[in-house]
C-alpha cells in the first residue's frame, strides 16, 4: 500500500491565487467558446440568455467544463514550477 501512496502527487491547497487562476481560465475558455462555437444558442435556453452571453445550455456546460480542465492544468503546472 505504501508505494501507491508515494505515487500520488502533492496537491495544491486552495488559496485566493488558485481561485484567481481558475476564474481566469474559465474566462479564457468562454472567450474561446464564443469565438469557435458555431451554434451558440442551441439546445435548451437558459433563463437569462444575456447573462450567459447568448449561450444555450450545451455551450455553457462545454465552456465551463473546458475552463475547469484548463484551470486544473494551469494550477498544477504553476504549482509544479513553484509559482503558485
Image (cartoon, rainbow, N blue to C red):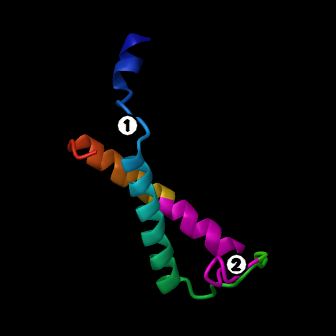
Q: For mark 2, what is the residue?
A: 56
Side of 57 where 35 appears, left or right: left
Q: Residues within 10 Å of mark 2 (few under 14, many from 20)?
A: many
Pinpoint residue 34: horizontal percent, then vertical percent. Answer: 52, 82
Q: Residues within 10 Å of mark 1 (few under 14, many from 20)?
A: few
The stretch in magenta equals 48-67
Q: Is residue 58 magenta?
A: yes
Query: Residue drawn at (34%, 54%), measured in percent from left and top?
Result: 74
Query: Residue drawn at (56%, 61%), measured in percent from left and top?
Result: 65
SS state under label 2 = loop
Q: Is residue 19 above or below residue 62?
A: above
Q: For mark 1, what is the residue?
A: 12
Q: Is residue 6 above or below residue 57?
A: above
Q: Quadrant of the C terminus?
A: top left
SS state under label 1 = loop
> Which is in the foreground here, disc 2 or disc 1?
1
**Residue 50 or 79: which is nearer the viewer?**
50
Query: Residue drawn at (42%, 63%), measured in percent from left and top?
Result: 25
Residue that lies at the very extreme toward the bottom in this rendered image? 38
**Residue 50 or 74: which is nearer the viewer?**
50
Side of 44 where 9 appears, left or right: left
Side of 46 where 19 appears, left or right: left
For the residues labelled 2 and 1, say whether their Cβ atoms are less than 8 Å apart.
no
Q: Quadrant of the N terminus?
A: top left
Q: Is residue 55 above or below residue 25?
A: below
Amino acid at each position: 500500500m505504501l508505494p501507491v501512496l508515494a505515487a500520488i502527487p502533492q496537491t495544491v491547497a486552495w488559496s485566493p491565487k488558485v481561485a484567481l487562476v481558475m476564474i481566469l481560465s474559465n474566462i479564457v475558455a468562454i472567450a474561446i467558446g464564443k469565438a469557435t462555437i458555431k451554434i451558440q444558442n442551441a439546445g435548451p435556453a437558459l433563463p437569462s440568455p444575456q447573462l450567459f452571453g447568448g449561450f444555450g445550455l450545451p455551450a455553457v456546460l462545454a465552456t465551463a467544463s473546458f475552463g475547469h480542465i484548463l484551470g486544473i492544468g494551469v494550477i498544477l503546472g504553476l504549482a509544479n514550477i513553484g509559482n503558485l
